[in-house]
Image (cartoon, rainbow, N blue to C red):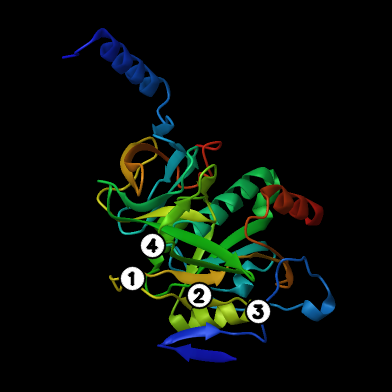
Amino acid sequence: MFRTNQTALFVFIAIIAVLLTPAADVYASDLVVEKPWARASIGVSRPTAVYLTIRNGGAVTDVLTMVTTPAAGMAEVHKSEVKDGLARMSPAGNVEVSAGTTAILEPGGLHIMLMELKNPLKKGETISMTLHFENAGPVDVAVPVYGIAASGPKFSD
Amino acid sequence: MLAVYIGLFVWRGTGNPVFEASSQSESNAFSPSFMLVDHQGNTVTEKTYRGQWLLVFFGFTNCPDICPTTLSDLAVVMDQIGGKAASVTPLFISVDPERDRVESMAEYVSAFHPTIVGLTGAEKQIASAAETFKAYYEKQQPDRDQSNYAVAHTSAVYLISPDGTFVRTFGYGTATEVFVTELNKRL
């Protein structure tokens, strides 16, 4: 039941927007979460990764403190680093997004590692995920699953 | 020299291998050797692949970021070199013999490209293979769950000639066009 016509109209537009763009950018106050995608997994025993960007258009720094998703028992921001020809990966802790900057989670760098998957992540599916920010609070993101060999939204197979 | 850390063999060369630049001088020439098991269960050595150009990458199948990115790049390269792909074999050598058994290697490499061969083996065999490639790896600290750990590893892709000699490396993130140009030049 809608209280006003404006609400109904807003909901209608929101639904249309979601239908038109499955990987729609998510706006939460001054934060914009863009280009989310997950790498398909092989079974459930191996971890996989989610990539996205967080743009902070506000005037204050915000901090990504936690990630939760019904798709995995554990979701954590990790960082891959290649230094002196050696690749290493470690938990990244909190991700600070200063005012006016963008945090980029991409292959070879920061990524949200999904561990203890509930089900295999299959190409074409969408998983839901909540990014918890210090200021913006919880931000829900719909994350499309691309192929295991995908390198980003441009090459979505 | 070979150092043992908590039962894990880790090869440390005389300093960090510098693989950024293409290096083809005589002083750097070496011929890697190994005895491992491929993802179909066959025992293989470097001689198995004589006559083939090899693109060799070290990694582990629980690796969610660097390894899939590199293997998908290699898949693109194999598609882009067309008919020449018959003379090129990408080898993915596990640095995580504890978890990467033959079946898991098969499951993993086949997800990327039918031409990619996954190799694993006993810990000593892996350590010895890595040593001859002058590659380095090291098991990282597990999290609360002891089976959840990452393995740091040399991130470059090695190009080995059909006679088994090291030609050059491609650093992590090298554009696929660079691989294709190099292979087209040589094949």
> Which corner quadrant holds the C terminus of chain B?
bottom right
Mark 1 / mark 4, whichever is N-terminal: 4
Q: Secondary structure at mark 1?
A: loop
> How busy is the neighbourhood of tag 3: few (under 14 within 10 Å), some, or many (20 plus)?
some
> According to the image, label 1 marks what residue?
B143
Mark 2 / mark 1, whichever is N-terminal: 2
Please tell me whether mark 3 or mark 2 is closer to you in this view.
Answer: 3
Chain letter behind tag 2: B
> According to the image, label 2 marks what residue?
B36
In x, y percent, where is residue B21? 76, 66
Co-location on one chain, circles 3 and 2: yes
Mark 3 / mark 2, whichever is N-terminal: 3
- Outermost right residue: B25
Of A47 and A29, nearer the camera is A29
Of B95 and A68, nearer the camera is A68
Q: Residue at x 54, y 44 (%)?
A: A101
In x, y percent, where is residue B134? 64, 78
